[in-house]
Image: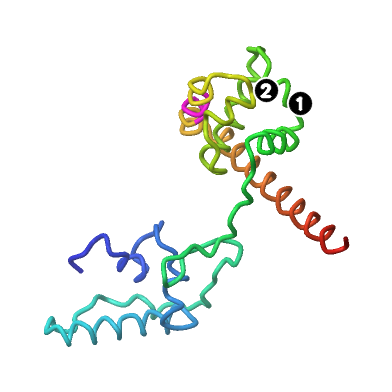
């Protein structure tokens, strides 16, 4: 195929680490890899014939083994209209975000806002700032106001976190873990709040 960035080679199983969700894409053409790839190629051939391009799509490597297509229902994706199917995160005010992040990390928010300059406090500040700005739609100026810091300081924490994350997988995993822990707690609290509103 001429269009190397189209995802065709990924759908045909020729890329070991695909960028697109192959199973999710193939589900539009059939329930198993074999039938879905056949359906996909059939649609391509039909389109090419209609455009007068012939019918040579590619070699089809499905004769060795077949398997059922598997979609992870936990992972958000984009639907046919381009809308995210993932759960939207709960909007948190900056002070709520800081409190929730500190609760998940088991640290007092006053320690994060303090003048302390030790290594561990710096690590926690970078975790919180990075998670807040990159994943929870927080603003450096708003977090800075809650922590009584200058916005440039909070922005610097995020920059440092980005650099460390690219070099240290353990730190990247800590950001993911904080994000997931906060999301779970936020969902439970929202559910509890709604339940209490229904009872009253």
Residue 162 in picture, x, y percent from top left: 47, 31
Q: Which mark is residue 25?
A: none
Describe residue 101's horizontal placement relative to residue 192 as left or right. left
Label 2–label 1 contact, CB within 8 A: yes
Describe residue 74's horizontal placement relative to residue 5 as left or right. right
Separation (CA) of disc 2 from disc 1 = 7 Å
Residue on which the image places disc 1:
108
Q: Which image quarter holds the N terminus? A: bottom left
Q: Residue at x 76, y 58 (%)?
A: 191
The image shows residue 131, relative to residue 11, as above or below, that is above
Q: Quadrant of residue 6?
A: bottom left
Q: Secondary structure at mark 1?
A: loop
Q: Secondary structure at mark 2?
A: helix
How many neighbours does mark 2 have within 10 angstroms: few (below 14), some (14-19), or many (20 or more)?
some
Which segment did they paint magenta?
157-161
Residue 17 in picture, x, y percent from top left: 41, 56
Q: Residue at x 48, y 80 (%)?
A: 32
Residue on which the image places disc 2:
112
The image shows residue 135, relative to residue 146, as above or below, that is below
Main SS of the magenta part reads helix
Residue 116 in picture, x, y percent from top left: 67, 12
Q: Residue at x 39, y 57 (%)?
A: 19
Residue 166 in picture, x, y percent from top left: 46, 33
Residue 68 in magenta?
no
Q: Residue furthest left?
A: 52
Q: Residue at x 43, y 68 (%)?
A: 22
């Amino acid at each position: 195929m001429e269009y190397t960035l189209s995802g065709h080679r990924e759908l045909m199983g020729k890329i070991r680490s695909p960028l697109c969700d192959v199973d999710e894409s193939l589900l539009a053409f059939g329930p198993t890899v074999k039938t879905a790839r056949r359906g996909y190629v059939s649609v391509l051939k039909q389109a090419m014939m209609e455009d007068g391009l012939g019918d040579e799509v590619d070699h089809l490597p499905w004769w060795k083994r077949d398997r059922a297509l598997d979609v992870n229902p936990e992972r958000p994706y984009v639907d046919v209209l381009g809308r995210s199917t993932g759960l939207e995160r709960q909007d948190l005010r900056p002070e709520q975000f800081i409190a929730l992040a500190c609760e998940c990390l088991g640290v007092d928010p006053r320690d994060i806002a303090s003048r302390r300059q030790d290594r561990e406090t710096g690590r926690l500040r970078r975790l919180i700032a990075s998670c807040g700005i990159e994943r929870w739609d927080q603003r450096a100026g708003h977090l800075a106001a809650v922590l009584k810091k200058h916005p440039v300081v909070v922005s610097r924490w995020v920059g440092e976190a980005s650099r460390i994350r690219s070099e240290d997988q353990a730190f990247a995993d800590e950001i993911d873990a904080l994000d997931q822990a906060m999301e779970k707690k936020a969902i439970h609290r929202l559910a509890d709040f709604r339940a209490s509103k229904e009872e009253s």
